[in-house]
Image: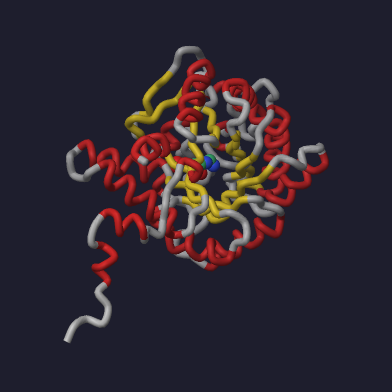
Amino acid sequence: MYPLRRNRRLRVNDTVRSLVKETIVTPDDFLVPLFVVEGTGVKEEIASMPGYYRYSLDLLTKEVKELWSLGLKSVLLFVKVPDALKDNKGVEAANPNGLMQRAIKTVKEAVPQMLVMTDVALDPYSIYGHDGIVENGRIVNDATVNALCTMALSHAQAGADFIAPSDMMDGRILALRETLEDNSFEHVGIMAYSAKYASAFYGPFRDALDSAPVDQQDIPKDKKTYQMDYHNRLEALRETRMDIEEGADIVMVKPGLCYLDIVREVKNMSEVPVAVYQVSGEYAMLKAAAANGWLDHDAVMMEQIVSIKRAGADLIASYFAKEVVKLL
Ligand code: PBG
């Protein structure tokens, strides 16, 4: 007697394995998150994200050119806003000469073909560190959506190709789509953070932008009234379906690794591309383990990226993008 199937025949050497490989990662798969600060000549490492930096606009130019030369063709912009410019309503977020608006222009001047996506949420601009406007201890939905529309319009006017609302307010995709259409920005796309969970993995990102919710009486200390509860899966499908109906061009699941079941289900029901955000805490965990000599950095990084793609990601926003592409 012999085994009916010998699956090991397809694993016998590199050549065979590469022939039957089901998941291929390419530079086209990536969105590169970039953190921008005021100043000149600034390239500061983020303490909880070793090897990742905030750039002032002059050095952003250099970074973006390097990304393009590596075949990385899309960036996702975030700004660190000085405290003096923060308020409850995020007024600065729509300043036509604000840091985000200048960053968009800087990237387009450096590399005109680079696809520019911008984060749309109030948290970097909020004195409370919330994605929306706070009133009587609540993050108010509809007033926030109006503010996000003004913010997104200013990004489109500055030259953004896609806006990426990460706020999780209800109804914002429809309102943003209408705002763009009404102002002749029908060519500007929307990548919706559709299934964005209230996750403890965002910690290092909030260090990077100094945007953590404040610990203050009568102010919610977390984002659980708008970001999703990680016990839930059907809710992710509902959020995604509604965002697609409201006009999202791309939907996103966030974070990555702990949510790959959700990624697969969203991929199976979505007729628009699915993005996955491998978030700051996922990056920090691997950097810390590798620094201690506990994990093989490059091997684990590739295993994670391939797993995200295998789960169904069409696009991956990742702080590892540059390192991955250099290894391909
Ligand atoms: C802002 C925003 C966050 C992230 C992306 N956009 C933080 C948050 O919601 O608190 C997290 C990204 C990361 O952790 O890498 N709304």
Asked if residue 217 shows in the view, the reply is: no
**Residue at the extreme top of the image, as rendered:** 40
What residue is at 51 percent from the left and 48 percent from the top?
Answer: 315
Asked if residue 97 shows in the view, the reply is: yes
**What colouring style does the render use?**
secondary structure
Give the quarter of the figure containing the C terminus. Answer: top left
- Image height check: is 272 above or below 286? below
- Using the image as rendered, state which of residue 300 and residue 244 is in the foreground: 300
Q: Position of residue 273 (x, y in %)?
A: 58, 54
What residue is at 34 percent from the left and 55 percent from the top?
Answer: 18
- Image height check: is 310 above or below 296? below
Q: Position of residue 59 (x, y in %)?
A: 48, 18
- Image height check: is 12 above or below 199? below
Number of numbered tags placed on the structure image: 0
Determine the image quadrant of residue 156.
Answer: top right
- Using the image as rendered, state which of residue 304 and residue 88 is in the foreground: 304
Q: Position of residue 319 (x, y in %)?
A: 41, 38
In the displayed structure image, the side of residue 86 where residue 264 appears, left or right: left
- Image height check: is 5 above or below 250? below
Give the quarter of the figure containing the N terminus. Answer: bottom left
In the displayed structure image, the side of residue 306 where residue 123 appears, left or right: right
**Residue at the extreme bottom of the image, as rendered:** 1
What residue is at 38 percent from the left and 29 percent from the top?
Answer: 46
- Using the image as rendered, state which of residue 146 and residue 216 is in the foreground: 146
In the displayed structure image, the side of residue 134 where residue 66 appears, left or right: left
**Residue at the extreme front of the image, as rendered:** 15
